[in-house]
């Protein structure tokens, strides 16, 4: 198994702040691809508790002469230089850890430990050993950020020299990397501009995002009661002085505009900086009663505060990268009041219907007053789409593709499509020799390799229950199977066959992209070809299309019943896109593998083309595979779709390594 070593200046065992959360999500992405991943965090003194550290983390002595107390803003820079320049125990500990781990890839999370990594790589090359690939994963344009954040009166030669050192270090990390990762398109362009030979390396954007969450209504009520809250705005920020500066810059001169029953709840390390700020010190008697600062909260309480907030505040006025709190606010579905800078990396505000934007303090206070005065609206109709766009699964999909191409894992290389035309020809030859092929049996063969005891499976278009029976066998009594079948007579037949099974739940509904009663075409004579619309039938003379009415639901409406979802089968005679568009929240939260039957005689009745499915998969962080488990890129798809087979797998990019290990590709001759 290939190994990646992440180098950071903060531990990832219990991630809290944005940098930790991003690096932890990246580590999980690498592991899902089949890499073994270790992390070395170089920690300054006692900045973190011993319980926060992992086995390979390295604690640097805070009293070391390499740390200049006049450069407190540059602790990370000094940490990397301490290790690289040391000839004693600190360097030996770092080098021995890397020697033991023997990475195939070093992933620099920010540039700070590049000098230490470079020293180890150079020694390895000098010894005749192979050098690892280098990934530089940035969170900001660090030199620019340090220059912009210089405090008033600190623009002396020492500070200027430190900023210049950061800029040189950042340029070196960029110019020696095999892959450069940025948080925003703007910062990717700035990093490329540092490089005289940008064609020598790969470049991608992997936006900041969040892990899916849901606010429990009872927990929301409990937190409100415990903190004595009625109508409140929520501000969440880390112990970063610009967070406090942005808050008071947008809400100055005081919080006197809030009514007696209104509060601003402030969560995170920013609290101390808020109370030290000159704006707060000018009117503490006014501001303090209007602030609620509950201290350190667990994740469930924070989610509850988000779920009960009248408005979520994003008063961000400086800084680089993209802000994780923006993704969190969007995902919550609550009204959000942001500055233009808070949307850095998230595009125009028009993409996010819950966001209001105000650019100056006067407009920001007026907008907050207006939001507090009106009832909280329900989440917009396309909230599921918005949520899906700000999850790590979507944001890190470009990184998953890039790292898999940079260093395919030995044990679980993601299979390339190969010569698609040659493979299709071999399939046709095998079918001719065998006199046909049972694609349903082939599909069964593939998904039974993937499924495990205890899994949750959804069968959409369960029909007579052929696949439902296999699903029940595969997941065992510990698992669960949900079957959806809109035809009343077929649903009754399924109920007779599976009604007594304690782990099977049957729904007499058609899954689609909206809820309600809808017309449905019962293909009498060929019921397996029934659907929301009349399709091109395989044997038109044998079919009598009969219109009935059925209940339609979105799969997203069942999301809370799908914890542990691993696999979804979709066979709905052309309405596949309707089903998928009604399942974007399920795809974002649970990230199942899907099988989808998709062919022109069926999907054509809905106005789709061959690319509709492929583009949807790509947009939602999925890769397409054929029924033989061969990966299909865009060029392969152009040839394969509508050629011989109609069955495909949609695999989350972060689960491709797992899928490849469980379902290795079949040769066409395996049809025999």
Image (cartoon, helix red, strand yellow):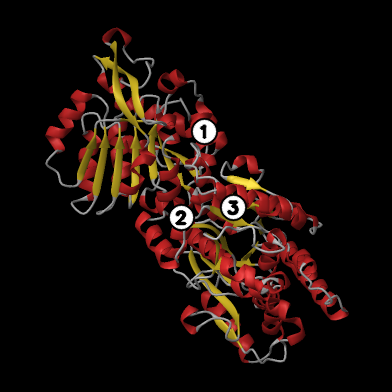
For this orientation, the residue located farthest to the top is 541
Could you tell me residue 257's position as x and y percent?
A: 64, 58
Looking at the image, is mark 3 or mark 1 earlier in the sequence?
Answer: 3
CA distance separating discs 3 and 1: 19 Å
Asked if residue 557 lies left or right of residue 138, the reply is left
Could you tell me residue 28's position as x and y percent?
A: 48, 61
Which dot, 3 or 2, sits closer to the camera?
A: 2
Residue neighbourhood size for the residue with mark 1, other residues' Cα within 10 Å, grouped as few (<14), some (14–19), many (≥20): many
CA distance separating discs 3 and 2: 39 Å
The circle on residue 374 is none
Q: Residue at x 69, y 49 (%)?
A: 358
Residue 143 sits above or below residue 570 on the image: below
Q: Pointer 2: what residue? A: 308
Could you tell me residue 352's position as x and y percent?
A: 59, 43
Residue 142 sits above or below residue 645 on the image: below
SS at badge 1: helix
Asked if residue 458 lies left or right of residue 343, the reply is left
Residue 445 appears in the picture as rendered: yes
Residue neighbourhood size for the residue with mark 2, other residues' Cα within 10 Å, grouped as few (<14), some (14–19), many (≥20): many
The circle on residue 402 is 3
Looking at the image, is mark 1 or mark 2 earlier in the sequence?
Answer: 2
Looking at the image, is mark 3 or mark 2 earlier in the sequence?
Answer: 2
Q: Pointer 1: what residue? A: 637
SS at badge 3: helix
| CB contact under 8 Å: marks 1 and 2 | no
Asked if residue 100 lies left or right of residue 593, the reply is right
Residue 54 appears in the picture as rendered: no
Residue 380 sits above or below residue 313 on the image: above
- Viewer-proximal residue, 472 or 550? 550
């Amino acid at each position: 198994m290939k190994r990646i070593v992440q180098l950071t200046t903060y531990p990832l065992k219990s991630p809290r702040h944005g940098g930790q959360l991003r690096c932890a999500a990246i580590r999980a992405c690498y592991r899902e691809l089949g890499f073994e991943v270790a992390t070395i965090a170089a920690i300054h003194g006692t900045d973190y508790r011993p319980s926060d550290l992992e086995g390979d983390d390295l604690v640097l002595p805070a009293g070391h002469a390499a740390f200049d107390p006049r450069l407190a803003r540059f602790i990370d820079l000094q940490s990397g230089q301490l290790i690289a320049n040391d000839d004693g125990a600190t360097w030996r500990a770092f080098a021995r850890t890397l020697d033991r781990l023997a990475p195939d890839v070093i992933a620099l999370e920010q540039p700070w430990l590049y000098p230490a990594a470079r020293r180890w790589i150079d020694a390895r090359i000098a010894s005749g050993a192979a050098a690892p690939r280098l990934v530089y994963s940035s969170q900001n344009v660090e030199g620019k950020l340090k220059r912009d954040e210089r405090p008033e009166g600190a623009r002396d030669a020492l500070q200027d020299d430190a900023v210049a050192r950061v800029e040189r270090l950042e340029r070196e990390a960029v110019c020696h990397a095999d892959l450069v990762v940025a948080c925003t398109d703007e910062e990717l362009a700035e990093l490329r501009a540092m490089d005289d030979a940008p064609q020598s390396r790969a470049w991608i954007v992997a936006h900041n995002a969040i892990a899916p969450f849901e606010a429990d209504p009872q927990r929301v009520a409990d937190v409100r009661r415990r903190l004595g809250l009625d109508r409140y705005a929520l501000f969440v920020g880390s112990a970063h002085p610009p967070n406090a500066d942005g808050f008071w810059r947008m809400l100055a001169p005081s919080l006197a505009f809030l009514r007696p029953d209104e509060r601003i709840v402030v969560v995170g390390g920013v609290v101390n900086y808020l109370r030290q700020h000159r704006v707060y010190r000018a009117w503490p008697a006014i501001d303090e009663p209007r602030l609620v600062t509950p201290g350190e909260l667990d994740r469930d309480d924070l989610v509850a505060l988000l779920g009960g907030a009248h408005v979520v505040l994003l008063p961000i006025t400086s800084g680089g990268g993209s802000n994780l709190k923006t993704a969190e606010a969007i995902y919550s579905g609550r009204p959000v009041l942001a500055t233009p800078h808070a949307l850095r990396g998230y595009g125009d505000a028009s993409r996010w219907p819950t966001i209001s934007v105000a650019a100056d303090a006067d407009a920001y206070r007026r907008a907050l007053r207006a939001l507090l005065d009106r009832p909280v609206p329900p989440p917009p109709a396309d909230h599921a789409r918005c949520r899906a766009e700000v999850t790590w699964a979507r944001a890190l999909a470009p990184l998953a593709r890039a790292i898999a191409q940079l260093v395919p894992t030995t044990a679980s290389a993601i299979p390339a499509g190969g010569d698609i035309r040659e493979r299709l020809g071999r399939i046709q030859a095998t079918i001719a020799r065998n006199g046909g092929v049972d694609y349903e049996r082939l599909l069964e063969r593939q998904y039974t390799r993937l499924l495990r005891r205890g899994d949750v499976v959804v069968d959409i278009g369960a029909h007579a229950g052929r696949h439902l029976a296999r699903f029940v066998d595969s997941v065992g009594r510990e698992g669960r199977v949900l079957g959806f079948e809109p035809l009343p007579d077929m649903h009754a037949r399924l109920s007779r066959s599976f009604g007594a099974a304690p782990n099977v739940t049957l729904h007499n509904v058609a899954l689609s992209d909206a809820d309600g009663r809808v017309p449905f075409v019962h293909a009498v004579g060929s019921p397996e070809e029934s659907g929301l619309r009349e399709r091109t039938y395989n044997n038109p003379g044998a079919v009598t299309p009969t219109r009935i009415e059925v209940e339609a639901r979105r799969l997203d409406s069942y999301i809370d019943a799908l914890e542990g979802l691993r696999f979804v089968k979709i066979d709905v005679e052309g309405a596949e896109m309707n089903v998928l568009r009604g399942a974007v929240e399920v795809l974002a939260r649970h990230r199942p593998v899907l099988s989808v039957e998709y062919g022109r005689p069926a999907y054509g009745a809905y106005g789709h083309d061959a690319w509709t499915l492929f583009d949807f998969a790509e947009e939602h962080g999925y890769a397409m595979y054929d029924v033989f488990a061969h990966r299909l890129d865009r060029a392969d798809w152009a040839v394969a779709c509508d050629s011989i087979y109609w069955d495909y797998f949609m695999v989350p990019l972060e689960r491709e390594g797992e899928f490849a290990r469980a379902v290795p590709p079949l040769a066409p001759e395996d049809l025999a």
